[in-house]
Amino acid sequence: MAGVRNGGVSFWWQQVGLPSPTDRLQGDTSCDVAIVGGGLTGLWTAYYLAEADPTLDVRVVEAEFAGFGASGRNGGWLSSELAGSARTYAAVAGEDGVQRLRDALRATVDEVVGVAAREGIEADIVRSGVLTVARSEAQRQRLDGELTAGQVADRVQVAGAVSGHFDPDCARVQPARLVSGVARVVRERGVRIHEGTRVTSVSPGSVVTDRGTLRAPVVLRCLEGFTAGLAGHRRDWLPMNSAIVVTAPLTDAQWGGIGWDGEELLGDEAHAYCYAQRTADGRIAMGGRGIPYRFGSRTDVDGRTQDRTVESLRSTLSSLFPSLAGVRLDHAWCGVLGVPRDWSASVAYDPSTGLGHAGGYVGSGLTATNLAGRTLRDLVLGNGTDLTRLPWTGHRVRRWEPEPFRWAGVHALYGLYRAADRREDDGLRRTSRIARVAHRVAGR
Ligand SMILES: Cc1cc2nc3c(=O)[nH]c(=O)nc-3n(C[C@H](O)[C@H](O)[C@H](O)COP(=O)(O)OP(=O)(O)OC[C@H]3O[C@@H](n4cnc5c(N)ncnc54)[C@H](O)[C@@H]3O)c2cc1C
């Protein structure tokens, strides 16, 4: 697409400069804890383990560079949104368990903001809250928000908004600055991050890579949307695509025209929802699902997304803000997040094998990675805590269907969600039955 930079990992990484991989693994060696994957799940786990016991030899093994995956590409919503399905967690831990997880995630927003402040991580963090808008009667009923159309417009003038909800427990971040800051602090605490080192398989006591084998009594798998690339894990979590476009910096007149004076994050209540932030340098970064899934659980190359997805995000942006219809887009990219078959995250560790993992946050991982990291720390150190009793701990889920059923199912599912959105946009006054069918098909 002419004029729009596509891929290059993400706009966030282009802003800070793409790093070159360092400290590649040099042949066989051993350590106390081997963490596979240098995204925020792996890095936060390393951070808290090193803090709890500085004598531990903790290593992170990363195929590219720390933050190459979703952690350096996301929408920058550090939100307290539940990572997973309330119904699924309630089935194992009751309503009380769901509430404890919600409370823990809410507290985790403060934890991340606090660690960043203490450790000198400059990540454009503003505890700005999030505004969710309903743009149809069906969306209004689902959202059940406290803001009238007029009150929404006082915050941001979104075309067609009929109501809204404001959640203060959310912060705006620049993802690459956050993840590179956490990586820096982790290294300062003595953890080695073996970048440019691809893991091919894991088993009790051993991490096999393209540059040698790392032996460790504790092996933690923290690959989220990339899990399917590991031998034996192809059908564990589905790598779901999400894509983002970023505009050129807007002029004061353009910001004035849409009345977006604050730095609150912005999303809608569509089934194929969008999420946006006002960046520190005065652009809008807006994301949505695009083409949801690539056949065979393949992932993108360096964040390059499809032209169709860029066009679809452009049209969502101008539907929200008609006055920005002609605005220049500077960059587009995509990434993968991990979706378990029941759309609910898990954190697990088996002391008898020394194997553990965390992930499957289904698009709400920025806050959840920190909570998961602290939970893995407690599990590995054998400490029973409030965290290890959260309903996602030890949560088990069945595998996805083999291909081509997986591909056909996911594409049909998102076809249904888009059809449901169209019917609701056309004036249906309640949530479309098509969406209910889609939820049932999805197993949510
Ligand atoms: C476009 C997009 C927007 C999103 N927006 C938001 C948002 O606004 N808010 C929110 O809460 N969540 C959001 N998410 C989800 C969130 O970013 C993720 O859930 C979270 O970052 C997952 O972190 P992680 O460390 O588990 O995985 P990742 O960050 O994906 O890290 C996994 C790492 O493993 C590495 N790796 C892969 N294969 C191998 C291998 N074989 N050997 C070694 N290393 C390997 C990868 O290079 C990568 O660095 C978004 C995700 C995407 C893709």
Image (cartoon, rainbow, N blue to C red):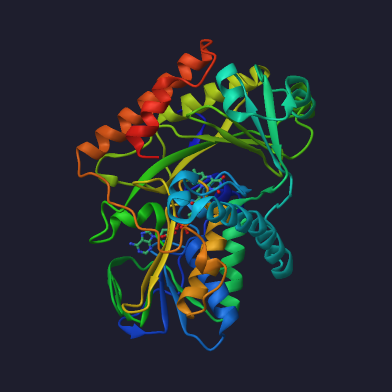
| Residue sitting at x 46%, y 64% | 38
> Horizontal and vertical percent for residue 85?
47, 45
- Work out which quarter of the rendered image holds the N terminus and state it: top left
Give x and y (percent) for residue 94. Answer: 50, 52
From what the image shows, is residue 335 above or below residue 43?
above
Pick the front one: 22 or 376: 376
From this viewpoint, is residue 300 visible?
Answer: no
Residue 436: give x, y in percent of width and height.
41, 27
The one nearer the camera, 442 or 421, is 442
What residue appears at the point 57 percent right and 43 percent down from the top-left corner? 75
Closer to the camera, 112 or 243? Answer: 112
**Is 44 left, or right, of 401 in this rendering?**
right
Q: Is residue 395 visible?
A: yes
Q: Residue at x 54, y 52 (%)?
A: 98
Q: Residue furthest bottom?
A: 55
Q: Is residue 390 left or right of residue 153?
A: left
> Measured along the vertical axis of the image, is residue 292 above or below residue 154?
below
Give the answer, above or below, for where 72 lies relative to 134: below
Depth order, front residue of 56/2: 56
Q: Tell me which corner region of the image, top left, top right, bottom left or bottom right, holds residue 109.
A: bottom right
**How many discs appear?**
0
Quick check: 417 left or right of 103? Answer: left
